[in-house]
Amino acid sequence: MKAYWIARVNVNNKEAYSQYAKRVSSALKKYSGKFLVRGGKFSILEGKNPYARNVIIEFPSFDIAKEFYKSKEYQEAKSFRDGKADFNGIVIEGFSTE
């Protein structure tokens, strides 16, 4: 069953975040991750959302999504984001009607 990484972000340093984003994109290939949402216009329909940026990445499975997060490639990319963006991220298993 597929899994989805959902992240909400406030970027505090655009240059550093740009370096993070480049490195994440290359690392995703190894783990068959695919961006479904990467920023873009959104509208809050209900409740509060203190984040300016939303990201959704699809992975082949929950375990692969977690493996990606723990990977050397992602942790290196993350070092460019740490302290330069407020980040809230989860991995969630997809829904199956089968």
Image: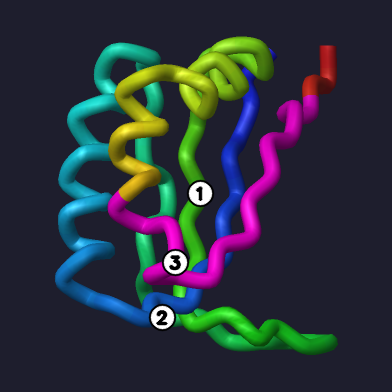
**Marks 1/2: CA–CA distance:** 14 Å
Residue 36, horizontal then vertical, whole percent: 42, 46
Helix, strand or loop status at disc 1 = strand
Q: Is residue 18 left or right of residue 66?
A: left
Q: Check the picture and name the quadrant holding the C terminus.
A: top right
Mark 3 vs mark 1: in front? 3
In the rendered structure, does residue 4 fall within the stretch colored magenta? Answer: no
Name the secondary structure under disc 2: loop
**Amino acid of disc 1:** Ile
How dense is the environment of label 3, judged by Cα within 10 Å: few (below 14), some, or many (20 and up)?
few
Q: Quadrant of residue 85?
A: bottom left
Give the left or right position of residue 18, taking residue 60 as reference. left
Q: Is residue 90 left or right of residue 15?
A: right
Which residue lies under the disc numbered 3? Answer: 83
Between 44 and 8, the residue placed more toward the observer is 8
Which residue shows up at 68% across the image and 36% down it?
Answer: 91
Q: Magenta part of the protein: which range? A: 80-95
For badge 2, the amino acid type reads: Lys
Q: Which residue is mark 1?
A: 56
CA neighbours of label 2 inside 10 A, class few (<14), some (14 to 19), many (20+): few
The residue mark sitting in front, 3 or 2, is: 3
Q: Does 62 appear above or below 28?
A: above
Residue 78 placement (x, y as % from top left):
38, 44
Q: What amino acid is labelled 3 in the image? A: Gly
Residue at the spot of label 2:
41
The numbered dot on residue 44 is none
The answer to whether 45 is drawn above or below residue 39 in the figure is below
Query: Going from the N terminus, do you reach mark 3 or mark 2 first?
Result: 2
Residue 60 in picture, x, y percent from top left: 53, 14
